[in-house]
Image: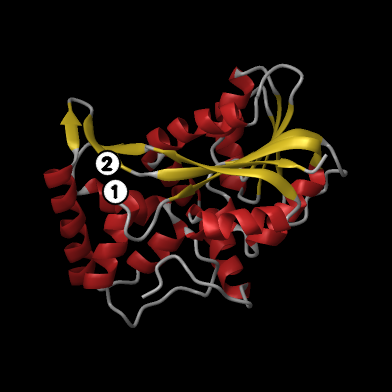
């Protein structure tokens, strides 16, 4: 079962699923709350990698709830955030009132060529229907020599939230239930795929950096809820499962959390490893 997608040519149904899913205010809020700690940890790395600071005109693409935009603003950058999701834009505007936010299409941005000194993308590239074409559009709006940094969750086979979900779904979900065909959400953690794609999009000096991100849940059973209520692809699959299969996946994830993660008074700290990919636009 392909939980997060594969190489495809027709992504129309995938794009509909993404746009409809992220238009749901409850999904937007679920992502912001459930992945808050993990996205904040990665946001700091993204801001560092694009050398955010005063006199930096930065675009935070797929800005979501504004967690990366907040880091860029804290560094003194002039920040524009773009997202196709109206609920996400509303969350971002509330969280980062000093940044400018616009609703738009990452695959066809309305900004002129060579507008920005830096572009950050916090876990947004997997939502591009064509990642290489999306990165070419990023390159277009970057000034020569400008920096891009984007993040990707580690998926199948990884030790943590996403890897555990893959494992549970493969063993316990109804195999007849599938998602619309879309790009593999985790393929760019592989340097053999990421470097050629980013270079083909017009970048150089491509680097991949591992980030030990993690998320926090107050109860082991809530890891299921993080995915079910705050991740469009996972939610689209999990919500269509029969109750007994949903319950089995929830229990399986809870067992992993209880057995394998550290805990303190704040809750259970679940690994959610990710990779940050950085590059510079051709000068």
Nearest the viewer among 34 and 125 is 125
Left-right relation of 100 to 5? right
Residue 96 appears in view: no
Residue at left 29%, top 72%?
Answer: 241
User: Given contact means CB atoms under 8 Å apart, are the residues at marks 1 and 2 in contact?
Assistant: yes
Nearest the viewer among 65 and 133 is 133
Left-right relation of 57 to 42? right
Residue at left 59%, top 60%?
Answer: 19
Where, by quadrant of the figure, is residue 77 drawn?
top right
Residue 266: give x, y in percent of width and height. Answer: 23, 27
Q: Quadrant of the N terminus?
A: bottom left
Residue at left 63%, top 22%?
Answer: 73
The residue at which mark 1 appears reads as 160
Nearest the viewer among 193 and 76 is 193
Residue 81: give x, y in percent of width and height. Answer: 67, 37
Residue 48: give x, y in percent of width and height. Answer: 57, 26
Question: Which callout, 1 or 2, points at the residue further toward the start of the chain?
Answer: 1
Looking at this view, name the residue that lies furthest to the bottom: 176
Label 2 sits on a secondary structure element that is strand
Q: Quadrant of the C terminus?
A: top right
Which dot marks residue 61? none
Where, by quadrant of the figure, is residue 130 drawn?
bottom right
Residue 75: give x, y in percent of width and height. Answer: 62, 18
Residue 92 against residue 260 in the figure, above or below: above
Left-right relation of 131 to 30? right
The residue at which mark 2 appears reads as 270
Structural crowding at the residue carrying mark 2, measured as other residues with C-alpha within 10 Å and reported as few (<14), some (14–19) or many (≥20): many
């Amino acid at each position: 079962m392909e939980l997060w997608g594969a190489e495809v040519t027709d992504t129309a149904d995938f794009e509909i699923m993404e746009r409809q899913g992220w238009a749901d205010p409850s999904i937007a809020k679920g992502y912001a709350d459930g992945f808050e700690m993990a996205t904040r940890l990665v946001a700091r790395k993204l801001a560092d990698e694009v050398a955010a600071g005063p006199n930096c005109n930065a675009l935070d693409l797929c800005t979501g709830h504004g967690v990366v935009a907040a880091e860029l603003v804290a560094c003194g950058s002039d920040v524009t955030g773009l997202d196709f999701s109206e609920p996400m834009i509303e969350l971002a505007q509330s969280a980062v009132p000093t940044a400018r936010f616009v609703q738009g299409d990452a695959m066809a941005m309305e900004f002129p060529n060579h507008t920005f000194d830096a572009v950050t993308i916090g876990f947004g590239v997997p939502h591009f229907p064509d990642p290489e074409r999306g990165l070419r559009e990023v390159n277009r709006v970057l000034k020569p020599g400008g920096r891009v940094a984007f993040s990707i969750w580690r998926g199948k086979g990884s030790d943590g939230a996403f890897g555990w979900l893959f494992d549970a779904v493969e063993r316990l979900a109804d195999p007849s239930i599938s998602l619309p065909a879309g790009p593999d959400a985790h393929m760019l953690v592989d340097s053999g795929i990421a470097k050629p794609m980013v270079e083909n999009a017009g970048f150089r000096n491509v680097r991949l950096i591992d980030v030990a991100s993690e998320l926090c849940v107050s109860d082991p059973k809530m890891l299921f809820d993080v995915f079910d209520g705050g991740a469009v692809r996972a939610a689209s699959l999990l919500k269509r499962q029969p109750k007994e299969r949903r319950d089995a996946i929830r229990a399986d994830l809870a067992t992993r959390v209880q057995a394998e993660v550290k805990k303190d008074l704040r809750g259970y700290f679940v690994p959610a490893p990710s990779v940050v990919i950085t590059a510079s636009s051709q000068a």
